[in-house]
Every structure is written in structure tokens, then in C-alpha cells.
């Protein structure tokens, strides 16, 4: 190795060491509270809603969205946002519309570039338990809807972020994510449509008329899930797991992934795997259960 190369390597190593020492020194001065490095200015704004409404519409960019039952019978929306991001919440034609307006100019992002370690959020406190519709369109951020609420229809679309739903609905529930997980628990629904591009899907204690689940890459796990008519699952890459589930008929298709688990009643099984082990009950009564995988095992039992 040439002398000049050795000098450059020693100098680079020395600068890296200095960088680590400065970082550890700064973190020690902040008592290892990494959020102290975030100098972005945030503020909390609360909007109280006086008008009656039956529909809820939320459109946000990077906020975490959480719903809560109101403890005082009033409706309010609490925003935790960066300064220059204007919150909006109002009722028009029976719909509570919630969103944000970013008033920053393009040059503000160049001048005020900071390390942002905190997440903006929207907390919605609802006085009633039953509403007609809920529509959420989210770019980046998690969404949480507890079991305290019931809707006639739900339509939730998230880009990057997880969706948790414990609320029930009587009509159609649609949840789609690009990069993020979907988790449903203790839900009663009519038509259930779940779509993921890259993410896991988990259903626990769910009853409905029909379930349709599609996905690119990601597993789906179902426990104590009962559909009156159909369970339809399609995956490109991902395992499909059942535990004490049932439906009048089932159609499961995955390119790369195992299909395993247990059903609560007998089925007429039609199983095919190009590469993998197939083990299904040799029953000749019940609804049709079609399982197809290109690469993966199919192992089903009755419980």
C-alpha cells in the first residue's frame, strides 16, 4: 500500500473516531434522550365540534390517527402538528371532515431541515358509538380504531403504516395498505375486503358474511374466524395459516407459501401443490375448499 493511501486511511479513521466521540458526548449531555436531537417545533391544537354528524372523513399525510370514546359527551379533535401545518376539522352536510393543510413554502424545507424523531398525530374523541360511515385516506402513519364503535361502512386506505381495527360494521369494510400490516380483532362485519402490497394480515375472533383478502408479499393468519358464505385468499408470496376457522366454502391460492391450520367442520378438499407436501382430511361432505400453491406445503386438520 502506498504511503499516501495509508495517510488517507488513517485520517479517515481519525475523523470517524472524532465523530463518534462528539456523538457520544452530545448524547451524554442529553442523558441519552434521543428525542432531544429533534429541534422541530410542534404545537397542540384542539378543535371542538358542536354540530351533529353521521359520517366521518379523515385525510392526512404523516399523522398517526387514533379514535377514542369521549369521556365528557363532547366531540373534539386534537392535533399534534409541526408549526405551519394548519389543522382543519368541521362538519358539512352531516360529515365530520378532518385534515391538515401544510402552509410551508418549498424553501422552508431547504432552510429548516431537521432530524424529526417525533410523530404528528390526530386524536378523534367521539361522543356516540354508532355512525353511518368512516373513510380514512392516510399516506404515512398508523391508524387505530377501537372496539367501542360501530359503522355501517368503512373504507380505509393507508400508504405506509399499520391499521388496527376493533370496530364492527354492518355493511362493507374495505382496508388496504401499501406497506403496513392489517390487524382485526373481535370484529363483526358484512363484506370484508382486505388488501396489502407488503405486509402481514392478522384476524382474530372475526365473524362476517364474506372475506376477500389479496396481497403481494406477506403472511395472513386467521384465528377463530367464521364466514357465513365465502373465505377467499390470494397471495403472491406468503404463508396462510388457519386456527379453528370455518366458512361455507373456501378458495385459497398462493404462489410461494405454505397453507396450514385447522377448520371447524368437514369440507370437500381440492388441494394442489407443485412442490410440497399435501395432507388434508379425507372427508366427502361439507362445502368446497380449494387450496392451490405453486411452492409450499398444504397441511389441514379438523378441530
Image (tube, rainbow, N blue to C red):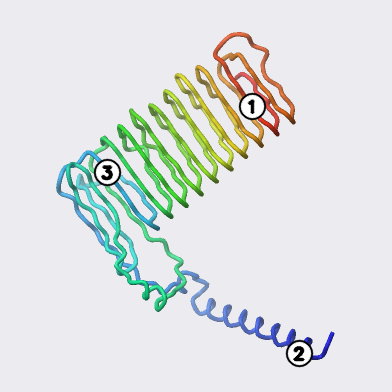
Viewer-nearest of discs 1 and 2? 1
Question: What x and y, as percent, mark residue 280?
Answer: 67, 19
Circle 3 — which element? strand
Residue 164: percent from left, percent from top: 43, 43
Question: Residue at the location (52% across, 35% down)?
Answer: 214
Tell me the residue that label 2 is attached to: 7
- Circle 1 or circle 3, nearest the eye: 1
Q: Earlier in the sequence, mark 1 or mark 2?
A: 2
Residue 29 locus on image (x, y percent)? 51, 80
Q: Is residue 7 left or right of residue 92?
A: right
Who's the residue at 25% across and 49% down the image? 97
Number of other residues with Cα within 10 Å of mark 3, as a class: few under 14, some 14 to 19, many 20 or more: some
Q: Residue 276, relative to residue 164: is it above or below? A: above
Sequence-wise, which precedes: disc 3 or disc 2? 2
Image quadrant in which the C terminus is located? top right
Q: Is residue 253 left or right of residue 13?
A: left
At label 2, counting other C-alpha atoms closer than 10 Å, the crowd grade (few under 14, some 14-19, many 20 or more) is few
Specify the quadrant of the image occupied by residue 113. bottom left
Q: Quadrant of residue 156?
A: top left
Residue at the top extreme, as displayed: 285
Mark 1 surroundings: few (<14), some (14-19) or many (≥20) residues within 10 A: many
Q: What quarter of the picture does the N terminus occupy? A: bottom right
Q: Residue at x 29, y 67 (%)?
A: 103
The Cα–Cα distance between marks 1 and 3, rounded to whole angstroms, is 40 Å
Residue that label 3 marks: 56
Q: Which residue is mark 1?
A: 292
The relative height of residue 159 versus residue 200 in the rendered view (above or below) is below
Residue 99 quadrant = bottom left
Amino acid at each position: 500500500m502506498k504511503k499516501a493511501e495509508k495517510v488517507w486511511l488513517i485520517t479517515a479513521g481519525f475523523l470517524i473516531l472524532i465523530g463518534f466521540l462528539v456523538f457520544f458526548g452530545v448524547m451524554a449531555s442529553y442523558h441519552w434522550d434521543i428525542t432531544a436531537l429533534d429541534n422541530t417545533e410542534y404545537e397542540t391544537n384542539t378543535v371542538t365540534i358542536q354540530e351533529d354528524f353521521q359520517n366521518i372523513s379523515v385525510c392526512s399525510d404523516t399523522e398517526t390517527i387514533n379514535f377514542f370514546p369521549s369521556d365528557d359527551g363532547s366531540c373534539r379533535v386534537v392535533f399534534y402538528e409541526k408549526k405551519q401545518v394548519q389543522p382543519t376539522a368541521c362538519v358539512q352536510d352531516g360529515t365530520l371532515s378532518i385534515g391538515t393543510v401544510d402552509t410551508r413554502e418549498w424553501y422552508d424545507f431547504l432552510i429548516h431541515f431537521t432530524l424529526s424523531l417525533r410523530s404528528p398525530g390526530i386524536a378523534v374523541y367521539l361522543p356516540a358509538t354508532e355512525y353511518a360511515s368512516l373513510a380514512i385516506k392516510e399516506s404515512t402513519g398508523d391508524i387505530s380504531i377501537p372496539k367501542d364503535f360501530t359503522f355501517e361502512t368503512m373504507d380505509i386506505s393507508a400508504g405506509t403504516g399499520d391499521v388496527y381495527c376493533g370496530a364492527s360494521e354492518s355493511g362493507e369494510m374495505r382496508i388496504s395498505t401499501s406497506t403496513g400490516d392489517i390487524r382485526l380483532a373481535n370484529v363483526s362485519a358484512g363484506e370484508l375486503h382486505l388488501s396489502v402490497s407488503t405486509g402481514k394480515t392478522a384476524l382474530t375472533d372475526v365473524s362476517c358474511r364474506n372475506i376477500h383478502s389479496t396481497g403481494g408479499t406477506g403472511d395472513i393468519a386467521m384465528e377463530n374466524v367464521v364466514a357465513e358464505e365465502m373465505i377467499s385468499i390470494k397471495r403472491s408470496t406468503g404463508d396462510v395459516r388457519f386456527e379453528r376457522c370455518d366458512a361455507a366454502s373456501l378458495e385459497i391460492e398462493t404462489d410461494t407459501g405454505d397453507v396450514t391450520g385447522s377448520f371447524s367442520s368437514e369440507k370437500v378438499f381440492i388441494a394442489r401443490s407443485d412442490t410440497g407436501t399435501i395432507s388434508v382430511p379425507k372427508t366427502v361432505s361439507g362445502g368446497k375448499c380449494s387450496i392451490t400453491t405453486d411452492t409450499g406445503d398444504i397441511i389441514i386438520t379438523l378441530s
